Image (cartoon, rainbow, N blue to C red):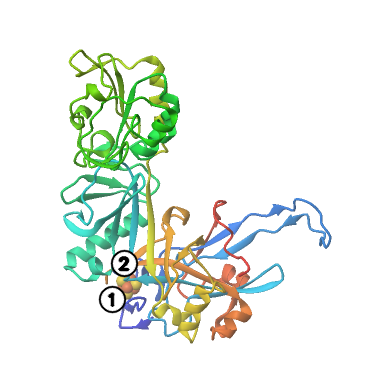
Amino acid sequence: MTDAPDKLRCDACPVMCFIAPGQTGACDRYANASGRIVRTDPLVLLERAAEAVPFVADGWDGNAVRPAEHFVTGIGAGTTYPDYKPAPFIVSSEVEGADLVTVVTEAIFSYCGVKVKIDTDRHLGPEMAVVRAKGEAVGHVTTGEYGSQMVSLGGVRHLTGGSKSEGRVTCEALLALCNGEAVELEIEGGSRVVVQAGEAPIVDGVRETRMRVGCGSATIGMFASQWQGLVDEVVVVDDHITGVVSEHQAGKVLGWEDTGIRVKGAKSTPGRYFRVAEPGTGWGGTDLSDPLDILGEWRAKKGARAGLTMLMVSTTGEHSAYYVLDDNLLPVETELPEALRGSVERIAENCEPALCTVLFMGGAGGSLRAGVTENPIALTRSVQDRRAYLTCGGAPVYVWPGGGITMMVDVTTMPEGSFGYVPTPALVAPLEFTLRAEVYAGLGGHTGAVRSLDDVRAEGGEYARENREEGASGENPWPLTLT
Ligand code: SF4
């Protein structure tokens, strides 16, 4: 950080704000406090509580309790952008007699975005449709997954390749989603959907409750034996594969009789139909409000007869209807018999709760590596071959194989408020690289800048004004592991 008359210059990002005494910079993450540039948020340390040793084994050292342990996260650590000097914290610790080093920083990500998995069968919009927030393009619809619609938001093109407003709104939306807040998205040619990590999506004002049990064909496979003897035909309506039990492999194996049913749509294999209707927010993710629209004339020569019964049901059990063929072989809706009600409820019971999942994805292969080692490629290689264990706010990450350090993390596994931003625009995320001390020295690490954990807990850092210790999530592996 550099002095200027009355003001101090923050050089933690390329904006290089001049900050007046008592004021914060453009991102609110740094302030001029008593003639010093400081981080406005506390440095977060995770604490693993002391634990009783479960049993006494050979080599027991006499302690019945494993003492509390601490881990310095990148949250509130500050950054040494553009990394011409060592990272804000390089911390030594000892685990099971081995010396470890954790290099801690808050990384600035221009190359980043989120992948959002939205558990719903409802059609949110066509693949590749533009996704907007506050009217700005912030991403697109990508390939659907089993029971979920997927959107990809952010990325360097939306952050920095379009108008200023597009970049700002994209950054805002990413920051909110990564910090667990709700964001309303509008999909061109589709729906409005409110997404929030760990919460149910709200599609066109309706909160989604269930994720489908499977496609129509899978539903037939799961429940065909339970329907046999209770009904003559079952059609499971689904935007992907609509299943017809009498024609389906499962029905055939069970000895199901032909019914003379005729289903409109593209036949894939027996009892499995694609494109029976347009995608939508009706039955099974189609635009159907009346499922009979997908049926043609019943064929007497193929088994249709007056009195034949049929259940039509969606893949979540949300929609169901029961019909009996009249003398003209026309289906007439009648009340669902009690014996079949249980099977519809069983479909619903087998659906998992619908949730939104937000994965932050970013590339950590840039200049921040120079804050770790004098030889940046050595860090890349050590992450790739797992000699360095990478965490994000202490949470485990998935590192993509291949070149660079391209990683993904589930934002709900990270401490609250882990993410920040700078107005370049880019997201700021905590990163920690943990590796054995001898490996760190071998890859040209800044060994002269290593500090003990006790020293960091007592003294903080150059920018960190205060520390905050919080309990580590019991669902994450403890980040100080031997690699
Ligand atoms: S935007 Fe924030 S990080 Fe960047 S120079 Fe200003 S105060 Fe520092």
x and y, in percent, of residue 110 in the image: 31, 71
x and y, in percent, of residue 249 in the image: 39, 36
Q: Please rate how many residues cluster around mark 1, counting C-alpha atoms within 10 Å: few if below 14, some from 14 to 19, many from 20.
A: some
Quadrant of residue 400 within the rendered picture: bottom left
What residue sits 28% from the left and 46% below the top?
194
Quadrant of residue 266 within the rendered picture: top left
Q: Which element is circle 2 on?
A: loop
Residue 97 appears left or right of 140: right
> Within 8 Å of ligand 1, the CB of disc 2?
yes
Between residue 4 and residue 382, name the one nearer to us.
382
Task: Single out the residue that lies furthest toward the front.
Answer: 301
Between residue 137 and residue 83, name the one nearer to us.
137
Q: Quadrant of ligand 1?
A: bottom left
State the quadrant of the C terminus: bottom right
Residue identifier under label 2: 27
Q: CA distance from mark 1 to mark 2?
A: 10 Å
Q: Which mark is residue 15?
A: 1
x and y, in percent, of residue 342 in the image: 42, 21
> Would you place residue 311 above or below residue 27 in this image?
above
Is residue 350 in view from this perspective? no
Residue type beneath disc 2: Cys
Residue 339 appears left or right of 185: right
- Circle 1/circle 2 CB separation < 8 Å: yes
Q: Please rate how many residues cluster around mark 2, counting C-alpha atoms within 10 Å: few if below 14, some from 14 to 19, many from 20.
A: some
Is residue 282 in view from this perspective? yes
What residue sits 34% from the left and 78% below the top?
8
> Within 8 Å of ligand 1, the CB of disc 1?
yes
> Would you place residue 467 above or below residue 32 in this image?
above
Q: Which element is circle 1 on?
A: loop
Quadrant of residue 129 within the rendered picture: bottom left
